[in-house]
Amino acid sequence: MLKIGVLVSGGGSNLQAIIDKIESGYIRNVEIATVVSSKPGVFALERAKKYRIGGTCISRKFFNNIDEYDEALISHFVEHKVELVVMAGFLSILGERFNKYYTNRVINIHPSLIPAFCGKGFYGIIPHRHVLESGVKITGATVHFVELEADTGPIILQKAVYVEEGDTPEILQKRVMEQAEWEILPEAIKLFAENRLVIEGKKVLIKKTAPVLSAASKKYSI
Ligand code: GRF
């Protein structure tokens, strides 16, 4: 059973998409061991509570520096035996200690087709505003492995979404979530759980089938 820890900061619609795909049996052998929010009182924690998933707030504000924050998150996830960390609408920055401890075991959903409309300052509604201002015809979402610099890790999955006449940033954001984010984030977790992801430099190869591993070596290797 792969235990995942989900990091959130807001409404939690991506968390809900993961819960629904586990509840429906589409994703198997995966358990959401804990949900951690960067802010208290967000709706994502309500969603977790409804499915009896342990949720808590660990805010960067509680700590003197990023190292202390990283250590607090690491010890919380280790306590819950988390093997994969999923950033689902998470707006805080994770530091070197966290990235080192969970190397190649942190994935993030970003609401654009990386490398377009991403990086520092591109979060929530902002990428969608820039997409509309730039006049591009296609946007979408990306799931990638996380590295220290925002939105730079090897890309696992992407899904394109057309920009339509009359779109506002809010309308476009909703369509990108519905048509792309809520599909590719659960899919990436499924592929990780099936041991079908191989990182080769900046690329992620998706193996057609899961490798046959002996019980002893059954470890989520990338
Ligand atoms: C999503 O669009 C996500 O890609 C972005 O923030 C939004 C939060 O969505 N990082 P939710 O909290 O999962 O509803």
Image (tube, rainbow, N blue to C red):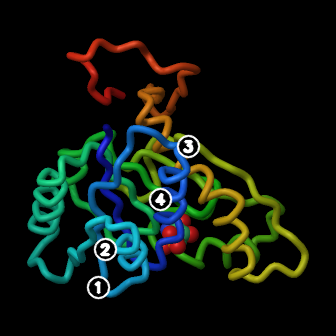
Tell me the residue at 72%/60% (across/down): 139
Callout 3: 10 Å neighbours few (<14), some, many (20+)?
Answer: few
Q: Secondary structure at mark 3?
A: loop
Q: Secondary structure at mark 2?
A: strand
Q: Secondary structure at mark 1?
A: loop
Q: Which residue is mark 3?
A: 26
Q: Residue type at mark 1: give it.
A: Pro
State the CA–CA distance, disc 2 to disc 1: 7 Å
Q: Position of residue 107 (x, y in %)?
A: 41, 49
Mark 2 vs 1: CB contact within 8 A: yes
Q: Position of residue 24 (x, y in %)?
A: 55, 50
Mark 1 vs 3: CB contact within 8 A: no
Nearer-N-terminus badge (3/4): 4
**Which mark, by number, is residue 40?**
1
Q: Is residue 191 visible?
A: yes
Q: Which residue is mark 4?
A: 19
Query: Is 120 displayed left or right of 96 in the figure?
Result: right
Of marks 4 and 2, the one in the foreground: 4
Q: Residue type at mark 3: give it.
A: Tyr
Tell me the residue at 28%/22% (across/down): 218
